[in-house]
Amino acid sequence: MIPRILHIFQNTPLGRESLLQAAYFSKQLEASLIVYIPQHIKFLMYFDNDVVQIDLDPSYLYSPDTAKDHAAEIIKEAGVEPLFLEPKHFTASSLPDIPADFDYMVCPRSISDLSAKIGFGYVGAKVRNIFNAARFPVLIPSYVYKPWKNIVVFYGGSANASNALKLGFQIRKETRFPLNLFTYAEKAPGDYRKEIINMGLEDDLNRQVDNWRIFESGNLVDNLYHVPHDALVILGAFAHGLLRNIMFGSKLEKIQAALANNLLVVGPKYSAPI
Amino acid sequence: MKPWRYPARWALFKMDDRLLLMFIGAIVGTCSGIAALALNHSLHFLLEALSHWRQHWWAFVLPAAGAALSSLFLEKIVKEGAGHGVPEVIYSVSRYGGLIRLRSAFSRLISSCLTIGSGGSAGPEAPVVMSGSAIGSNIARFFSLNDRQRVTLVGCGAAGAISSIFNAPISGIVFTIEVILGEWTALNIIPIAIAAVAGTEISRALQGDQIVFSPQVFDIGMGDIFASIGLAVFTAIASIALTHGLRSMHQISGKVKAPLWIRAGIGGSCVGIIGLFLPVVLGEGYHFVHTMIEGNFTPGLAFVAVACMAKILATSLTLGWGGSGGIFAPCLVIGSLTGLTYHRMLSAIWPSVNWVNEGCYALLGMAGLISGMLQAPLTGIFLIVEITGGYAVILPLIIVSAISATLCHYIEPSSFYLKELVDRGHLLRPGTDARVLSDLSIKELLETDCVCVNQNMPIREFIKIVENSRRNYFPVEDDATGEFVGMLHLDDIRPYLFNRMLYDAVLVGQIMNPNVETVLPDDDLTEILHKMDSQRLFSIPVVVNNRFVGMISKATLLDKYRKELMVQTTS
């Protein structure tokens, strides 16, 4: 089955960049891009064990008359067939339900706060909820459209990082772009290799990973400088409990605060196909 | 992993998950009972706090302010829609295994408190049902329970809330089964009953074992039994009038180009103006119901009839224009006014007949209104019996409830709660065709073992493919682009099979059917099945971006349908 990517279109210059990025991602993965042009300020996504209400930044409703044409034009230019999502179900008359059975979703760092306020280091509460509840990975596009030419997976040994690694292998197979592994060592470097071998991924590790950088010194943020500027960064979200993440911060928080790259975030409910 | 977050895996509950549901059902019933009491006490506090201001001529602004604040709170702070929320609960049970947002556990409590406490004509019961259901849903989510268990806990929340607010456990159970879940199974009834008991006990522990309306002794004669048939007709008319009033007010307010909170304020101020002349229309109105049941409501026939119509108008204005609250309490007030009107008409026409006390007709009217509006006769019967403590009126109660519900069903096939869902095709009751199909997805049914052929392929090559295939349908793709261009059925090559001369002369593209009906992976299975039936198709290709992705066949669909039906009916 052809993978399906959900994109919520924002008819603004910032939204155009996101859609260009989504179209590029879709083209690389030979996936169909399904665009939802919001008609209401909020919508619901019913996941397996959670329901998330997305209250959109009002700029998502700008100029509704031109939104579809703009979106179609951008997608066609990228060489992808535009498909638009029309909600079929409504929890209330002004509260559509958007399906949650996609393979990927493209989502900015924040979907509810005014775009003008969003900066690095901030991921909106709703986007976090989607990370936690979704069975699909979420692509956080860079602010300006930038085609990525290689893949970086952050692997730290957690279950989510393992899923991120598997997703990295899959995207590598589909795109043929080089795959680099980054590890900020918190234990002996050999242990990471053993973990991957125990997962039965030794073959993929040997054949598909072009370079594995294990940082044994320096802090995480300093080492992020080595991430190529044109890489798609794949990483797991919130491997630890909420309290620990609040007290000490999570790797995701530190990485997303420092990197301007496209980020593909794998949440705890995602299970990689391999 | 934290084992306490997954009680379904505990050894005790692994044996039989009914034990788990009974245990968590008691917790849910208790929590929803507390939520119901919190709203009840907040309402009384607000009504008392504002009571001395109601004497002033400007008191009409109180319901306006309350409704506007309620709308602002819902729209701007919790970002939910107006209304009472019961259809939302039924919808989530129907389609999403009872998933309800956490904010719904408190949002309607606060908004309805503002609307009703300030004098808006609405009731607190539906908001507490929404709140209780959301509590049940979120407790189920916290403990990672499955859809079936979650739906039961949503029912537990609703039952606990109704039981607590009315001190009426049987009504809580019956309302949940009849209105919210729409099914009665051995699996859900016990946890729901336990939740109802928990909700009632909390109510009794915190505010005493009080019956909502004081019990009365009625001496019902045969004449009254026959007269109750006429009352059923009256209550059915009042139910239909209220249903239409609510809907038309909603439509009218929708045409007003003003923010929601302004509209709610306009509706509230109209209610306030009516309330200056007829205070019976203000708030939940239980005080007046009390007086009517006791037979102490002194105004005459004309006043009672006008008050009944005014209450219908006030409720329509409050809820139709954006206020928050439910229709339970207004139904009880309108029902008792209808009963009183009817009784006084009978007394005026046949003054020599020894009719029972008019309080009895007020009770019967309440049951008739509830049964008519909700089209749930059992809820009407048990609620009135429990909240008045009077089993003596059970016979006329059954007659009024049954006839009122039936008449309303003829005129409005769907109840007030279900109308919108039915119109949108969103009501999927357990065991129905639509419900079974909604739980299946195209992904599950997709047959991907089809062999695609090129349109420039000669028949000779195609016959070789047919020899090694078990399928009758072959999708045809464009050689250059890979796009789907049509379908070829085995029957299509039959005319050429016995003429070997044509094997290299005829190409697949020449004999395929290019005008094939296709579907998308997001299409509704009910629509796909309808399409297959209407066009007599046995299978249909799924095409995305002009690419063939698989086939949906009727045989696979019906096979999966049967399996899903077994899962749903045996769980």
Image: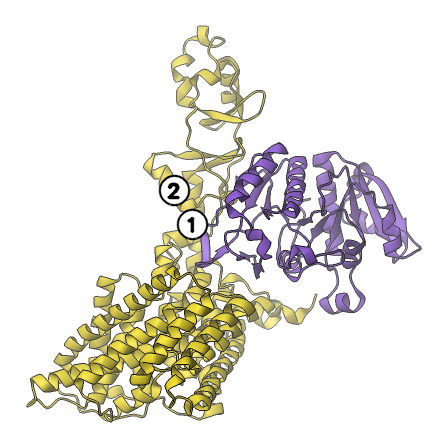
Chain colours: A purple, B yellow
Residue designated by label 2:
B529
User: Do residues under tags 1 and 2 come within 8 Å of each other at their CB atoms?
Assistant: yes
- The reply, left or right, for residue B509 in relation to residue B336 is right
State the CA–CA distance, disc 1 to disc 2: 10 Å
The chain that hosts pointer 2 is: B
Query: In what quadrant of the picture does the C terminus of chain A appear?
Result: top right
The chain that hosts pointer 1 is: B
At numbered mark 2, what does the secondary structure look like: helix, strand or loop?
Answer: helix
- The reply, left or right, for residue A232 in relation to residue B121 is right
Q: Is residue B15 visible?
A: no
Query: In what quadrant of the picture does the N terminus of chain A appear?
Result: top right
The residue shown at (81%, 47%) is: A197
- The reply, left or right, for residue B127 in relation to residue A229 is left
Position of residue B404 relative to residue B489, above or below, is: below
Please, what is the three-letter code of the amino acid marked with disc 2?
Answer: Leu
The residue shown at (80%, 66%) is: A248
Residue B412 percent location from the top left of the image: 26, 62
Please, what is the three-letter code of the amino acid marked with disc 1?
Answer: Leu
Q: Residues within 10 Å of mark 2 (few under 14, many from 20)?
A: many
Residue B278 percent location from the top left of the image: 29, 84
Position of residue A99 relative to residue B452, above or below, is: below
The residue shown at (26%, 82%) is: B336
